[in-house]
Amino acid sequence: MFGLDYSWLGDPVYQRWLVDGVWVTLQLALVSSLAAVAIGLVGALGQTLRLWWLDACIELFVEIFRNTPPLLQMLFFYFTLTQIGFTVTDPVTGLQHPLLSAFVSAAISLSLFGGALCIEAFRSGLDAVPKATLEAARSLGYTRLGLFRRVQAPIAARVCLPSLTNILTNLFKTTSQASVITVPELMYAAGQVYSDTFRTLEMMLMVLLVYVTLVSLLAWALTLAERLLAYPGYGKGF
Amino acid sequence: MLTDTRYQRRKRLALLAILGAAIAWIAFDALLGGSAEWARVISRLPLLLTGSGPAWSIQGGFAFNVLMGMLSMAIATLLGLLMGIALLARNAWLRRGAFMIMNFLRNSPWIVLLFAMLYLLPHRVELFGTTLSFSPFFKAVVGLSLPTAANFAEIIRGAVGSVHSGQWESARSLGYGTAQIYRQVILPQALRRMIPGWMNLYALLMIATALATVTGVQEVVTLLRTTLAMESETALVYFYLTVLLMFFLYCYPIALLARRLENRTKGDAI
């Protein structure tokens, strides 16, 4: 069809490479998403403490990671962590190995990038809780912790779910850039296959389709969660 | 509890202190032998910025990133506008089609789209007897503008949708037609809300131009990597920091301005 040749897809070797690639992509996405959300929570909660020095540090972190290319961040972390940083000596062969593999470097850099985006999203979610609601809760005698737990956090979580969906899908898409630092994920596997078969266009169209399917599934699941959790009047509850 | 202005002032002071500490650390490092590395970076800086050693002409480098960003943004604005109009169309099929295309482009990774464009677009096209050749630069611009256009369409849709539905109803009850409502009620408000999103999108696109390295464009990351192949490993960190700083200095002011505009339009109208 359209002069595209997909006969190589029948080869079990290529199939295994690609399936392994998808598997690594999923692992990388999962690890960095969880870490990013954790960093986001810590950062956003840190900012609610209203300590000016902590606030300044967090803001600097966010702005640095938001305003530089994730590709460069990944390259930077990969080379600094593996080459200059820590190495372990293999007791058997006596060779120096980098302690942190490409996968770990990619996971760290993606977590920090996603974490910076999450801090920003969670913070604006917390800001979006109406002042009147907070004052009403305070006048009902909520303590500061109770107020946060029972009023501010539930509302803020629902307000920032749509932007969290954006961030997590974005992070999933960004995992494809880890192929540049030789993490054996889907893009990398695709590169190996097409350097064997020379079917570049076919390969790229297929990879595009796989990514779109996976990201769409993720977006769909998160949107479903949004709808199920919605409060009337906040976010999707209108 | 500090008052808000005093808090902000202290925070700004803390930021300045961190900046000062960073400069002091760089100076300290330079005394310990880092100055030789910085000298290397400075000697390569014209190459990284303009793509030519003596910086007499622009053949690549960060200038190419800026150029790619601007061209892609221009194309993406036009395409996104068309897609956004289609998303708001009354014809359900047009709307559904536009929605599908938008979702496809938004859900595909930029780097994969760039690769796909690299192989999908022909090397040259015969058009009315003249031969147009598609350079990697042109392909990168197309590849970058597609997801940007989809994101812009979503911004348009979001901005129009953010105008309260009560305004539609009241305008209709006053006898306005659809075109009139768009022109006189919805768009003046929606446009104000679109601009910060559009600027953020430009900053995002600028950051994504680093990905054009995979299409073989001589932009700053490509040049950085070829330069580093010739340099010693100790100079590596200094080079990376320099290029990261280039992107930061370009994108941060844009993001800052976008946020200021966003805050200004946040309160108005429901």
Image (spheres, coloured by chain):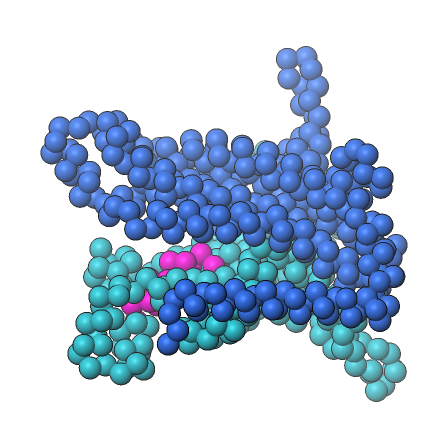
The chain coloured blue is: B
Q: What residue is drawn where x is 86% and y is 78%?
A: A95
Extreme residue toward the left, this view: B173
Counting every numbered tag in the picture gives 0
Extreme residue toward the top, this view: B129
Q: Is residue A108 left or right of residue A39?
A: right
Tell me where residue A25 appears, x and y as whole percent. Answer: 59, 63
Q: Is residue B176 above or below residue B140?
A: above
Asked if one can make out residue A232 in the rendered structure from this viewpoint, the answer is yes
Q: What residue is drawn where x is 49% and y is 48%?
A: B257
Q: Quadrant of the N terminus of chain B?
A: bottom left
Tell me where residue B26 appears, x and y as whole percent. Answer: 75, 66
Q: What residue is drawn where x is 28% and y is 57%?
A: A236
Q: Nearer the viewer, residue A200 or B63?
A: B63
Q: Quadrant of residue B173?
A: top left
Q: What residue is drawn where x is 58% and y is 55%?
A: A67
The chain coloured cyan is: A
Tell me where residue A63 appears, x and y as whole percent. Answer: 55, 60
Residue A160 part of the magenta segment = yes
Q: Is residue A84 above or below residue B145?
A: below
Q: Nearer the viewer, residue B7 or B86?
A: B7
Instruction: Name the dominant secondary structure of the magenta segment.
Output: helix
Extreme residue toward the bottom, this view: A91
Q: Over which residues does the magenta segment extend? A: A154-167
Asked if one can make out residue B157 in the rendered structure from this viewpoint, the answer is no
Tell me where residue A165 appears, x and y as whole percent. Answer: 42, 59
Q: Is residue A221 left or right of residue A172?
A: left
Q: Nearer the viewer, residue A192 or B232?
A: B232
Residue A208 part of the magenta segment = no
